[in-house]
Amino acid sequence: MSEVAAFDCGTNTIKLLVGDLPEVSVRESRIVRLGQGVDATGRLADEALARAFAAIDEYGAILADHDVSRVRFCATSATRDSANAATFAQGVHDRLGVWPEVLSGDEEAALSYDGAIRNLRTAPASPVLVIDIGGGSTELILGDASGPLTAQSMDMGSVRMHERYLTDDPPTAAQVAACVADIDAHLDACPVPVAEAATVVAVAGTALSITAGVLDLPTYDKGVIDQAVIATSDVHAFVDRLVAMPVAERLRFGWMHPGRVDVLGAGGLVLSRVLRRCSAGTMVASEADILDGIAWSMT
């Protein structure tokens, strides 16, 4: 069975999907914080590169166990913003034999939308808004059954906003207010008419973790989280509670990944502020995202 291998390398995570679609053999994720400090320094940190290359070495070993005919490695916000992106690209090529593609914001949005929409078990009411909150950027994509109609990529994500604003543990009221003001300024300038969405689908780690919190799960359970429909009012309430918690208290959640614990408050604020502009009263969580879109692009 010939399979494809899709890599999604973001600011906080590197993900791998291997499969003969729609069948998926492997879905793995490693939190490596590749975008550590990029917002301030403009460069990928040496220790961040080391973490990323270690994860890619693990993934290379996985690929060796599969009959993979095509590989696509897509990199997003962190490598768009770094002066030493060539060092990272060479490291990827040395390990996997392919060069990473640095996606434009439009490409990233289209792949995120395709991956999320294909995963829905029931046809959604249109138009559909897909919210993809990453470590460095957030994509908002409004579309219908034909695909994206309009999209915007904004330089606000969980790592970027955390490093920029929420520096105390827990953050001060003034820090939270400054973070919210920046998020709102981005959304004020965003041309995507989010209020028109009849269905809201949220993908990627921030939204899935917040969903686990809203559902009060004892551990992270993909089977429960994927396709879960939660009230936006519950998202707002949980995010407010989360942001006020110190990191040590957040770690008591059984579903919390330690690699996401510090930045989840900032990501949650992005999600909450977007949802406040939506007329839909619920949000659908989707485990499928840009990674699936990348994989489908090779079929």
Image (cartoon, grey):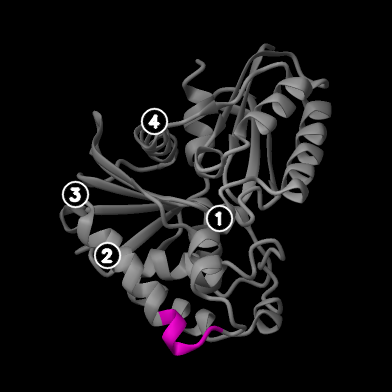
Callout 4–callout 1 Cβ contact below 8 Å: no
- Numbered disc in front, either 3 or 2: 2
Residue hosting label 1:
205
Quarter of image, res 73: top right
Residue 225 in the figure: left or right of residue 107: right
What type of secondary structure mainly makes up the magenta span? Answer: helix
Q: Which amino acid does label 1 sit on?
A: Gly
> What whole-number distance in Å separates the C-alpha atoms at marks 3 and 2?
12 Å
Nearer the observer, 123 or 284: 284
- Vertical arrangement, residue 119 with respect to residue 224, above or below: above
N-term-proximal mark, 2 vs 1: 2
Q: Is mark 3 on a helix, strand or loop?
A: loop
Q: Spatial distance from mark 4 to mark 1, Cα to Cα?
A: 20 Å
Whole-percent x and y of residue 213?
55, 72
Question: Which structural element holds mark 4?
Answer: helix
- The label on residue 137 is none
Q: Which of marks 2 and 1 is in front?
A: 2
| Chain-order first, disc 1 or disc 3 | 3
Disc 4 versus disc 1: nearer the observer = 4
Residue wearing tag 3? 191
Q: Is residue 292 visible?
A: yes
Crowd around label 1: few <14 · some 14–19 · many ≥20 (10 Å): many
- Per the rendered image, the range of residues in magenta is 171-176
Q: Residue 107 carries which label?
A: 4
